[in-house]
Amino acid sequence: MGRSEMEVDARSGYCAATRTFRSKRADVPLPADKEVDVVSFLATRRHSGVIALVDAGSGRRITFAELWRAVAGVATALAAPPVSLRKGQVALILSPNSVHFPVAALTAMSLGAVLTTANPLNTPTEIAKQVADAGPVLAFTTRELLPKLPLSHDLRVVLLECTRLPADDSDPRIVATIEEISATPPDPARRKYRVTQDDPATLLYSSGTTGPSKGVVATHRSLISMVQIIMTRFRLEDSDKTETFLCTVPMFHVYGLVAFATGLLGCGATVVVLSKYELPEMLRAINTYGVTYLPLVPPILVAMVAHPKQLPLGQLHKVLSGGAPLGKELIEGFREKYPHVEILQGYGLTESTAIGASTDSAEESRRYGTAGLLSPNTDAKIVDPDSGEALPVSRTGELWIRGPYVMKGLMNIIYIYFIYICQHFLDLLGCLRQNLLYDTIFVEHLV
């Protein structure tokens, strides 16, 4: 019996025959061509956008034409000696938010390299541990953060800076600044490695629900799927207006990386990059650059509600919260103070390449205590953590999800069961539980 023949409850999306919840949102189209990487997918999207990135501090603007020209130039430079970055190697970004971050990320993935990112606030010891685990051959970082990289590791370094200083020549690891190699003439004749949707694209570190930080491997398919979900969620391709998003969340995190360094660049939206969050600077950027969408985390929302006066929000009409659930009191307090701004939520994990469920309208957001509907192209089960039994509607358990965006596995851990969950979801739930490999994306406790 095929899925179309199975009875699915229209209200919940639950199928009693399989004990599976099916997303009530329409599936998003995914490319049939397996020989496509996420960067090519983004670069070939048609849209009417002109400005891709804006530095909130300096006002510097980068057009889409300049962005893709820079990616091509940096790729040409890094594919050649002395770096010779190639498919399967790992490239690290250790940097605060900047307009250089997307260029570095897109360049690495376009060459088939696997991108890993590190929190700039991490200690040198923590960064050294990640470097030892991931094994990067190249690091993109700033002059200020360079001392945090381990000296003993043979890393080539590209500085995410506009100019090169004489002192840089004293460090043999430094090969160039990003601005220098952005001007490299693209070489159409250079050897290009075959990069497919199944190839690893990112290696992001997450502590999951328990234990030490683990490297989560996502593929180009994972990112392409999430790009399509993001564009569908905001309906940006159907709009005649260019929307402007303010990047307040860190790009090293899956939330920032997927939204601001990949997804939104495929639909013509303008991304205003805030190097670090400060409320006065955020408000200045919102009003100076005509920001219409504000993705943020709950503490920023709390600050906006707690402020003694109504803050000037200019053309802002949507706030997108993620990272932790919002309570009824906070949502109602925000709506009362800023009635012209719609508040939406998203739920996801590093292991789900960002969004697994979301509220996409004011009506959905009024259902307090929910993270929204499952993302498109998603199946889910609520599983009893003790018995491993899949549960029906309105029961409490662990959330197990399946979708094209789900991670490929964990770095340096035997993850055959994670691969199987994408291929044989209905058959291997018990096997996953018995092997204690389900404590990543699949163990979120929900009611």
Image (tube, rainbow, N blue to C red):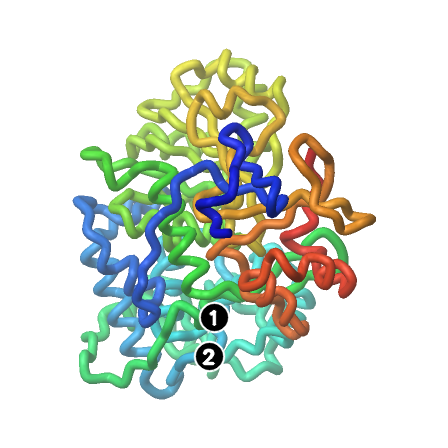
Q: What residue does disc 2 label?
A: 88
Amino acid type for the residue under numbered disc 2? Gly
Near-viewer residue (137 or 10): 10
The picture quadrant where one finds residue 101 is bottom left
Q: What residue does disc 1 label?
A: 200
Amino acid type for the residue under numbered disc 1? Pro
Q: Is residue 279 left or right of residue 232?
A: right
Q: Is residue 135 above or below residue 72?
A: below
Q: Is residue 6 left or right of residue 384?
A: left
Residue 164 seen in this snapshot: no
Residue 263 seen in this snapshot: yes
Q: Is residue 324 left or right of residue 199?
A: right
Q: Residue furthest right?
A: 386
Near-viewer residue (13 or 108): 13
Q: Name the residue: 51% across, 49% down.
A: 354
Where residue 303 sits in the image (x, y, percent)?
A: 56, 26
SS for dot 2: loop
Q: Name the residue: 41% across, 80% down.
A: 87
- Split into 4 quadrants, where in the image is the C terminus? top right
Near-viewer residue (430 or 142): 430
Where residue 347 sits in the image (x, y, percent)?
A: 55, 40
Q: Name the residue: 29% across, 39% down.
A: 236
Q: Residues within 10 Å of mark 2 (few under 14, many from 20)?
A: some
Q: Is residue 145 above or below residue 99?
A: below
